[in-house]
Amino acid sequence: MTRPVPRTNSLHDLPYADATRLILSGKHPDHVETVNPPVHRASTILHASCKELYDPDCAYVYGRQGTPTHRCVEEAICTLEQGYGTRLTPSGMSAISSVFLAFLRAGDHVLIVDRVYSCVRDLCNGVLARLGIEVTYYPASMGADIAALVTPRTKMIWMETPCSNTMEVQDVQALVGVAQEKGILTVSDNTWGAGFFHKPLTLGCDISVQAATKYLVGHADAMVGAVTTNARVWEDYATAHRELGMSVGPDDAYLCLRGIRTLGVRLKQHEHNALTVARWLQTRPEIAEVRHPALETHPGHALWKRDFTGSCGLFSIVLKPAPRAAVEACVDALTLFGLGYSWGGYESLALPFTVPETETSAEQPGIRLHIGLEDPQDLIANLAKGLEVLTAFPSP
Ligand SMILES: *Cc1c(COP(=O)(O)O)cnc(C)c1O
């Protein structure tokens, strides 16, 4: 039995000119059950009647406020983060700025972990300062003693664990304890844990923010942010998100949903590969410290073990003092590691950074590594080459 071939000229008999036919043809509302939801590209969303258009419970109003494609991604992230509601934003940074703008007003005070993702500092020192919002940076090692920094105007505590580059693990439970007692909002940047290895909302945080650009998208081909909140603050956040006009292209949203499907297997492989490389790096004499929270030697290991169920591909190494040029020659020799910003894709990356002066007396060079899905033994051989270049570098 062969199936009949359906006709493709079903509008043939309509009494319209070509210009009109071009507009009307090629729209099939037929419902087909595919594995993946279709990508809804939309500015205008058509309503069946004025009654539906003005219905306050209308699910899809206008493209900017999201299509079924966006709602599918939001549901997947919300499930992962065990939240009440999720909204997408055009990048991780816009997720962060939208949370500040949603909850802060002139005269408010915010406590931000001092090793926060560096662009957040720029945002605080720029836009937030201009709006009259005051920021105090607190040490990443602070727990319940953060109470000493709280003022009557303190509105929010911002966490990021582990912190960018320097990888300190924060005591989320102690910070949340103080915040709840004093009625302060808590937000955690959960990009490293990706909602898979770490779930801030289950630890009492009000909001979890992710640069979905990293592991959720997972293939270095789209920018997306995600904000997940608990029930208490959802209405306020979702309203601000709408007012701010935060809108993500449906194709990028779809890429994020596609990435999410393999998040679990990718992260477990990133974890295995990164730990294999990190343990090898620990044996190398050129390296002062391997900063990976899942290593027993990491100062935050116990907190990591308490609050995380695994580790991703991102960690850093601190080298013994070396000239900047030597570190750059070492990184340039890492042919299997891309050189560039962001991380969380399937590929390995290396990026030099400097350990903040407040931590060491001499300036110490570091390299942030993202370990991808390549064979870890190939990565190790490549790193060995890079370290040879470092050692052979002529001293000034
Ligand atoms: C990359 C990153 C961001 C910013 O995300 P973008 O999508 O690049 O704007 C925010 N927080 C952390 C921890 C990040 O690593």
Image (cartoon, rainbow, N blue to C red):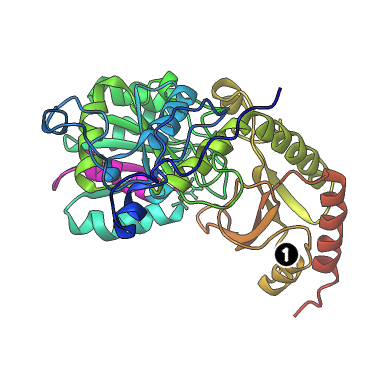
- Left or right: residue 178 versus residue 345 is left
Relative to 134, residue 196 above or below: above
- Left or right: residue 172 versus residue 338 is left
Foreground pick, 241 / 367? 241
Relative to 136, residue 7 above or below: above
The reply to whether residue 285 is in sight is yes
Please state, as top left, top right, bottom left or bottom right, where the C terminus lies in the image: bottom right
Image x and y of residue 136, in percent: 30, 47
Residue type, numbered disc 1 = Val
The residue under the point 64% across, 28% down is 264
Which residue range is magenta in the image?
94-116
- Residue that carries the numbered disc 1 in the rendered image: 331
Please state, as top left, top right, bottom left or bottom right, where the N terminus lies in the image: top right
Image x and y of residue 366, in percent: 65, 57
The residue under the point 63% across, 47% down is 345
Splitting the image into 4 quarters, where does residue 216 fall? Answer: top right
165 is within the stretch colored magenta: no
Image x and y of residue 218, in percent: 59, 43
The residue under the point 42% across, 44% down is 225
